[in-house]
Every structure is written in structure tokens, then in C-alpha cells.
Amino acid sequence: MKIERGFRGKLEDYLNISQPVQVKISTVGNAVYDTCCFGVDSQEKLSDDRYMIFYNQPQSPNREIEYSQNSDLYTMRLESLPAKIEKLVFTVSIDGNGTMGQIQSHTINIIQNGNSVLELSLSGRDFDSEKAVIGIEIYKKGVWRIAVVARGFNGGLGELLKNYGGEIAEDSANNQNNKQNNNSNSSENLKDRLMGKISLSKDKVNLEKHVVNLSKCVVDLKKKNGIDLGNTRAKVVVALDFSGSMGTLYRSGTVQQTINKLVPLGLTFDDNGSIDMFLFHDKFIKLRDLDLSNYENYVNYILSSGYRMGGTNYAPVLCAIIEGYDEPVGGFFGGTRRIAPIVDNGDPTFILFITDGANADHGATNRIIKKCSDMNVFIQFIGIGNYRFDYLEKLDDMKGRVRDNTGFSKMSDLASASDNELYMNVLEQFSNWLKGLQ
Amino acid sequence: MAVNLTKGQKVDLTKGNPSLSKIFVGLGWDTNKYDGGADFDLDASAFLCGENGRVTNDLDFVFYSNLKHSSGAVEHTGDNLTGEGEGDDEVIKVDLSRVPANISKIAFTVTIYEADERRQNFGQVSNAYIHIVDQVTGNEIIRYDLGEDFSIETAIVVGEIYRNNGEWKFNAIGSGFQGGLYALCKNFGVNV
């Protein structure tokens, strides 16, 4: 059915709202057109910016809304949306030059099971010099309804975001020109990102959104619990368990999800925007640093590197981080060179130690933990999977330490943990340790 | 406390409140919170109808060009061109005691001026309502919020007051029409 500006109706009259509903937005013209779905509250505000679905954030937290950029198609499970999300506003905005008055056509289809149930067709004649169009609203008033707004908006995606109460991360021209140079700039970039603003920049991955959310958490929790990591800079190191029992967790995506969750947390206070990465089994393997540009495929990188899984020893990797290690040198003469310890007297080192438990070297691990208990390093163990954590659960009772320099939190369902829970679980003990330093 | 009505509901106005005679019929709406497009000019009108539901002559149609009925019973307080501001957008005063005996109902309507030219309709209007206020006490007697029921219509019969066994009642009609004021006039027998 063709619909026009001003059309309103109950969605249930046209489709089954218990089933996924799709919105496809097509704009034909000479400019770059970006679509966005704002999931707003009863005040028409984006009170939860995880519900701004667009190129930098193609899905909502529980995948109630998923966006495919290739086909400009939004797929929604309306009945799964949280109650606070009362309206989904679909917009298109011009990135760069051009106006909505110049478009050839703007079409929105409401689709279910592959059939276009409702179709809105607009053209440049419907608009003037606007940079954006608010196309349709799908909203809840008793039942889910649709309203065709089809009105221009004076401003692009940034102004739309402000209109719905969000904030944008300013993107300097410098950053735009430095895609390849991300590492050297990442510390600066991060500062921008940590201001609790949404980045509209397309060259950045949606991890930033997590960084943004987490930095909001930092502020919230600071107020609520007095945990203050606001100005803390630390060298964040991740040690990943690569023992045989972890195999399914790597293959099932659990490890990647864990990385996706923890990395932004690490980046909120890492000193240089890239994280030192280690695998450990019987021994340890130094991996390439992890940053915003490579985190998404990090587990694929590990699995494709050909490393063999092994047993579970915690001490070798901890010693390498804390005391340095010898790295083989290639070439005719072979030999090794000494790699300096990460732990030093500068910023503290924060080790995120991800394991499914059951290490074989209790004695050696005890020794290195005790040895570094007066040093500038804190070890946060994170238990994933459903293995046994007898050793880690008793860590708190370990005597003979200058300071309690370890934390343990078991996060069997880490993927669905909220940022708040994650923050509390992973950073609370580190925060206490930091206080002890001062 | 005003009575909030739902579509189709009929309530007594004067029964139990015999002193009620002078009332304000206030109509309000919100429009066009977006950029672009023309202003919305919504017009409230009153059709004073006989038993057959139609006007007996064209002057029984009170609107922006005929603000006061010859009987003095119905008076439009003037046109608001943009719908801006809080509170009622347009008000029609009615003195029930002066309504001529041949008038058995008064229908209150809202239409969009130049709806077709401006490509506007009631789907773009939100929070529309009608309420009736006692002119003497200032109390709101009834209120009817029109809700989300309108789409591409350009005219709405919002409600009507009508005689019933010597008393006045109110009927929350809330029916939409396409064709604007012209269609409504045809419906109520006004020559246009």
C-alpha cells in the first residue's frame, strides 16, 4: 500500500508485529546519504545512546534493531525493545554537499517476510534546502503505530543527534587525515572519545561507542560508589589463556566477545591507546598490540597464527610482563635479545588475566604474585567459561604480600553483562589497590 | 474535575447542572515541529443543524468569515493563523439558552486551510482536543482528546452538542473526512 506524508496507522493492521519488521530506506541523488534509526524515550530523547543505530553502531544491545549498511535495511523485533524505547525515528541525512531538494527520490518500504507492506515515495519536490529528512516514526501508543513525518530538517546527522539530546564527538580534520597513523594519534583521539560523545566519524569502529558508554559509567560510578579512575593512566596488558580447554571458547566467539567487552574498558584509561597482548599456555606468546583498528578480528588473527594450544601455567606470562623476557632473534647467529619489563615506575600496569582456570603451577604463580606485591602492578583475573577456579577463588587469602595486588571475578556470562556490572567487577579491586598506593 | 471522554461517548451537559448556559468550546492542537513546509492554519467551525442534521440556511455555519450567528448564541472568537502557543488555539462561545428552537445540534469541526496546496493533513497534527468550559465558573466540564486516530484526513468533526429531552448533551464524535471544509459544508448542507 502506498502511504503519504501525514499517514498514521496501527502496524498490526498491516503486519504481524510479533515477527521481525524491516524498514528499507533508499535515496537516489548525487550526494552521500546516511540513514539512522533513533530509538528515543517518551520525551523524544535519546536517553540511551546504544539505541542510535547507524553506520557506527549497526545493532542495539540485544539486537532488537539491526542495521545492514549494504542494503540500508533495518530489521526490528519491536516486542523485544525495552519499555523505555517508545519511538523509532528513521532519518536520512546528507554527508557533504547537496540538499534534500536536489534528490531524485526517497523511498521507504516497510517489509515483512520479504513483502513490501507499506511504501512511501518522496522526491526532491517534497523538500527544499534541508540537509536531512525525518521519514517515518514507528512508535508505541497503546500499540505499535506508524506515522509518516516526511519532513525536512535543517541540519545533518549531527544536528539530528543534538535534536534528540545526544552529543557528538568533534572530529578534527587532523584525525580524518590520519587513518593510517592511528596509533600515534590514538591517545589524542581517545581523549575526544572519552567525553561521553557519540562519534559520527565513519572511519572509526563502533568500539568507540563502548568506550563512550564506559566512560559514562566511570562518571556515574564515581558519583555512586566513589570509584574514581577518572584521571588514572595505566599500562593495560591482557593475558589470554590458550590452554586446550579454551578451544571451544575461542571457536564459539566467547573470547572475541570478551575482548570486545574488555578492550573498551581498558582503553578508557590505557596510557597510549594500544594494549599489550599475551597468550599463555605452558609458556607464553607475545602477540601484536591490540587497538581500535584490529580488535574486531583479533581472535581470528590468533587462530590463524598457527600457535598450538597447551597446558595452563600462569607464572611464565606474569614473569614476562613483570620482569621482562628474552626474545629469539632471527638470522644466522640466532640468539636472543632482552625485552624490558612492562612494569616500571611510571604509570601503573594493569593486567587483565583472562582464563578458564585450573592452572598447574600454583607454587610458581604464588611466588611471582608475592614478589610483585610491592611493585607498580595489579593483576585482575577474569574467569570465563565453566571451568574450576579453586586456585583463583583462594587468592584473596594469600599471605606474604605487601599489598593485595590481585582481584578475581568470574564472568561466565560476560557477553550480556552490562557496562556497569563489568566495571564494578573488573575495576573495583584495582581501584582499591590504587587508593592503597596513595 | 472534567470528564475525559473517549470516541463515541455521550455525556450530559445541562442535566444535573441546570444553571449551565454560557460555555466556551475550546479546540487545540500541535503542529509542525519539524523544519520545512508551510505553516499549518487550522480552523474551527460550528455548524448549527436542524433535525435532519443539516443547516437550514448558510448563515447557520459559523466560521472565520461569519464569526457570529444571527441569534447571538454562537460566536467564534477569532482565527489563529499558526496554532502557536499554549492552551486553546481557537474558541467558540455558545450560550445554550439563546440557541434558537429549530437548532437541534451544533457540530464543532476543525479543518486545515489550503490542506491540498500545502500538502497537509491531520496525520501531521498531534495532541488535538476539544473541551467545554463553563464561562461563569471557569471550570472545565468535559474534555475529549482525539489521540492517534487521524491520518490523511483534512477535516474532523470533533464533537457535537445536541438537544435530548429538553437537555443538552455532548457527543465525542472524532470522525475524519478527506476534502477539508468543502466536504464538511457539503455534508452539513451549506452551499459552497
Image (tube, coloured by chain):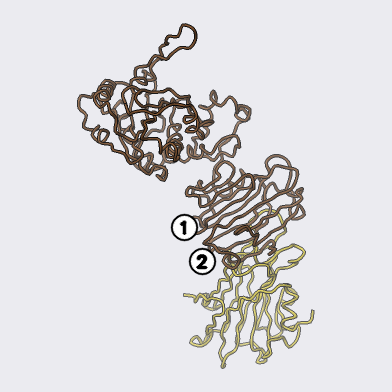
Chain colours: A brown, B yellow
Determine the residue located farthest toward the right in the rendered image: B192
Q: Residue at x 66, y 57 (%)?
A: A109
Number of other residues with Cα within 10 Å of mark 1, as a class: few under 14, some 14 to 19, many 20 or more: few
Q: Position of residue A156 (x, y in %)?
A: 65, 44
Q: Tell me the quarter of the image containing the N terminus of chain A.
A: bottom right
Q: Are dots 1 and 2 on a single chain?
A: yes
Q: Residue at x 26, y 20 (%)?
A: A371
Q: Which mark is residue A142?
A: 2
The answer to which of marks 1 and 2 sits earlier in the sequence is 1
In the rendered image, which residue does mark 1 sit on?
A83
Q: Tell me the quarter of the image containing the C terminus of chain A.
A: top left
Q: Secondary structure at mark 2?
A: loop
Amino acid type assigned to the residue bearing label 1 in the image? Ala
Q: Chain letter of disc 1?
A: A
From the viewer's side, name the closer residue of A55 and A251.
A251
Amino acid type assigned to the residue bearing label 2 in the image? Gly
Q: Residue at x 47, y 31 (%)?
A: A303
From the viewer's side, name the closer residue of B138 and A50.
A50
Mark 1 and mark 2 residues within 8 Å of each other at the beta carbon = no
Q: Position of residue A322 (x, y in %)?
A: 34, 20
Q: Position of residue A396 (x, y in %)?
A: 24, 33
From the viewer's side, name the closer residue of A118 and B165.
A118
Q: Chain letter of disc 2?
A: A
On the rendered structure, is B119 left or right of A234? right
Distance in Å between CA atoms under marks 1 and 2: 12 Å
Number of other residues with Cα within 10 Å of mark 2, as a class: few under 14, some 14 to 19, many 20 or more: few
On the rendered structure, is A341 left or right of A100? left
